[in-house]
Image (tube, rainbow, N blue to C red):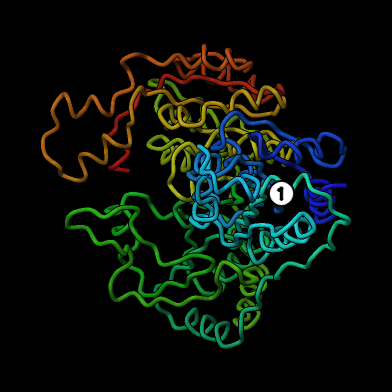
Amino acid sequence: MNGAHTLLDTLVASGIEVCFANPGTSEMHLVTAIGKSDRVRPVLCLFEGVVSGAADGYARMSGKPAITLLHLAPGYANGMANLHNAQKAHSSIVNIVGDHAVWHHQYDAPLTSDVPGHARLQSQWVRVSASAEDLALAGAEAVQAARGGAGRIATLIVPANHAWEAATASADVLTPEPLATVGEDAIAAVAAALANGRRTALVLGAGALRERALIAAGRLHQASGATLLCETFPARLERGAGRVPLARIPYFAEQAIEFLRDFEQMILVGCKPPAAFFAYPGVASLLAPEQCAMLTLAGIDDDIPAALEAVAERLGAGDDYPVQVRVQPERPDGDLSPAAIGDVISAHLPEDAIVTDEGITCGLELFLRTQGAPRHDWLAITGGSIGFGLPVSFGAAIACPGRKVVAFQADGSAMYTVQALWSMARENTDVTVVLLNNSSYAILNVELARLKAGEPTPKTLSMLDLANPVIDWCDIARGMGVTASRVDSVAAFAETFAAAMRERGPRLIEVMVQQDLGAALRR
């Protein structure tokens, strides 16, 4: 038995079931150990950004970590963008990063670099194994760290010789840090604030956006009149017909400031005070009014549902809460606009679907139009690092194979992690990609106008244009084994999307969007 085998045994005992991998030479002994085991499902991805994004989607939907298998610092670096999103989503991930054998570092070979330094940028826990015998314990500690609180990124760095050298035994499973209990003082303060008659927003994020917590928040709304708000980019929001409805804070700072201007106090539950995504000339960074009082009920790592329920009991709230009704939109006609696309999706989305949103400019309308769709989970781009949608939808499908996954995917962002299509086909995941093709980085056209950077020249606009040459998404998808079709009318999209919802397997629908970019900002 070698270190790789004892590490794998420990990871399995700790609850690991899936490994998203893009391995190299330094990881071959762990690859071999996985190949000899029937207890871990290996999932090959062709780029590390797909590996990390898939692990994020898996964690958001399963509530537990997968392991990633990455090759030295460059492999980890390739996965950083989606690890950034995963960190902002508080996803539970265990990265296993292979490194050179200990004695090989002195020769400064081409792939020699500071692996721990890279890992610390996104990981809340980083450790280099000390020996082959230590490797199993390090693995147990990594899972313990990743499963602590609401979820964290843990990175274990494994020198190659620790994987191949002899080791005697796996390690015991370690108990993770539980969610913390919110103190009575915070519960009493929030209950008092909800009873003071001031115009109040309950701003919900993280675990507050799951059904149990939302029901408690709905009871507080009924008892106090507080407005229920959702953070702009939720890691996982349970929404749709039969669930507690809430309004999402707008993305554009100007809209958000107007949206929030009348609130006198905000109660933060699993989130921070709302802030603008970027700084803009003459626009405030904090979106709430200066005089708005801020109270925190619970942080990310607190037992949020229990805290909300405790406030409801102290306030004497009843059992009633608001429920979103099913809205069956009329079949749209006219342009294939984001609004029409949203209405079609709302009409045909199956019960308990999972929706990933990297629709960028189109996503603003799609969110509103699907509020009354059948119950579903909505996964957003928490960290703003694009290339999120395809990998996260793939990982969500691995976590929940019995549920339909729909990926709202902007064309420019899709090119960052297009390799995810190949993995979708290889694993035969039930993902329908709605590829929103407007042949541009449309959001950047909007941002260019908002920043008042001056009149753009043709050279300026060329840096935001994806139409020269035109990207053929159907050819790309088919080349990776995914069924694909292109639609340029509402009727064609409705027919194609409805068929995709009835059938299983990966497919891509390229939607030739007709979009008024100014409408996104006005919205």
Residue 270 horizontal/vertical position (percent): 54, 66
Q: Total number of numbered labels?
A: 1
Residue 200 horizontal/vertical position (percent): 43, 72
**Residue 372 placement, left or right of 144:** left
Q: Which secondary structure lies at badge 1?
A: helix
**Residue 8 placement, left or right of 304:** right
Q: Is residue 154 above or below residue 466?
A: below
**Which quadrant of the rendered structure holds the C terminus?**
top left
User: Image quarter for residue 136?
Assistant: bottom right
Q: Is residue 268 visible?
A: yes
The residue under the point 44% across, 39% down is 386
**Residue 227 placement, left or right of 185:** left
The amino acid marked with disc number 1 is: Ser
- Residue nearest the observer in this picture, 506 or 171: 171
Q: Is residue 389 above or below residue 236?
A: above
Q: Is residue 301 above or below residue 337?
A: below
- Residue most toward the left? 455
Q: Residues within 10 Å of mark 1 (few under 14, many from 20)?
A: some
The residue under the point 32% across, 17% down is 467
- Residue nearest the observer in this picture, 216 or 392: 392
Residue 37 horizontal/vertical position (percent): 87, 38
- Residue nearest the observer in this picture, 18 or 5: 5
Q: Which residue is mark 1?
A: 62
Residue 510 horizontal/vertical position (percent): 49, 19
User: Image quarter for residue 356?
Assistant: top right
The residue under the point 60% across, 36% down is 393
The residue under the point 69% across, 46% down is 67
Q: Is residue 115 above or below residue 34?
A: below
Q: Is residue 376 visible?
A: no
